[in-house]
Image (cartoon, helix red, strand yellow):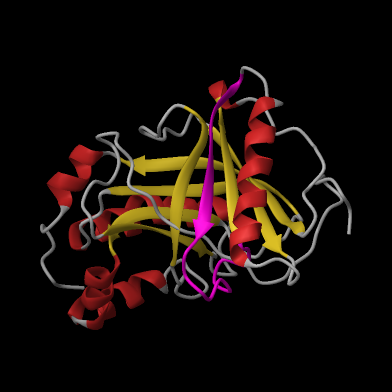
Amino acid sequence: MLGTYGWDMLCLDGIGVFPEKLPSPQNPSEEKAVKLVNLVTRRADLTRAAFRDYYESHHAPLGTQYFPFEKYVRNHLLDSDPQDVGFDCVMECWLDHQKALGLLDGPAGEIFAEDEGKFMAQRALGVEVEEILLAGSPRDLDTPQLRKETLMLGRSPVLDRGAFDEKVAAFGRELSKQSGAGLMRLVFDKVTTPDTSALGADALLTAWFKDGAGKLPQIALPKGVTLVARVTTQPHETTASQLAAAFGTHTGKK
């Protein structure tokens, strides 16, 4: 295992993430709203571009008709290390998780299963996370002009969850100090669900860079923390007004 994260760093073992209520109007405010992170994989016969086009032009609009999202972002992969990370999009949303599961148990579940089959390899399972702002300004609207870099981090068995979270937060703050003026913000997605296997990591650190430029510096990882993957994404977010206008407009038909 290497002591710094870089393009030669890998280590695939189980991981996950967690939610937070953010004060910006663009972010969730209700007590029952939690943040979910899903890793979505494209169908094998589709290019990444075709997957992204169907997601943005068909599936995401369909989802906004059924689910009361408070914030809904699809982060499409542009680059990764290792190259084959096994997914093509990091989906983030804030909503009442239990209500969402209830909807999928009803007639909507069949509608979504059919639509997901048109572009996904399999249904993505969400992991609850707590989003913690470590540096920079609070989140607002993620536009496609932005670029985000995410470090997917793993926990050694020698660390308990609390000690691991403390090390990741301290590591993230040090990263932000060394990232320069181009860094807009850095957040820590802290795992809250016990089973993190759907995420393939135990924590996420995500950086936003101005004008789509910039990268996180390579510094030594804390003992007991490993780099599972490093991904660069382009975000696509449905605006708050679009979410409000779309919710409840479904016909209930396939």
Query: Is residue 159 shown left or right of residue 233?
Result: right
Query: Is residue 1 or residue 198 the one in the foreground?
Result: 1
- Numbered-mark total: 0
Q: Is residue 243 magenta?
A: no
User: Picture coordinates of residue 170 (x, y %)?
Assistant: 65, 42
Q: Is residue 188 magenta?
A: yes
Question: Is the C terminus in the top left, top right, bottom left or bottom right quadrant?
Answer: bottom left
Q: Position of residue 208 (x, y in %)?
A: 54, 33
Start-end of magenta stretch? 182-202
Residue 33 occupies quadrant: bottom left
Q: Residue at x 54, y 46 (%)?
A: 188
Kindly tell me whether residue 48 is visible in this rendering: yes
Q: In the rendered view, would you say 130 is above or below 107?
A: above
Residue 80 place in picture, x, y as percent:
70, 49
Q: Is residue 151 visible?
A: no
Q: Residue at x 79, y 37 (%)?
A: 218
In what quadrant of the picture does the N terminus appear? bottom right
Foreground pick, 71 / 4: 4
Q: Nearer the viewer, residue 121 or 181?
A: 181
Q: As displayed, is residue 194 above or below residue 129?
A: below
Question: Vertically, is 184 above or below 157?
Answer: above
- Going 13% across and 71% down the picture, which residue do you hit? 252
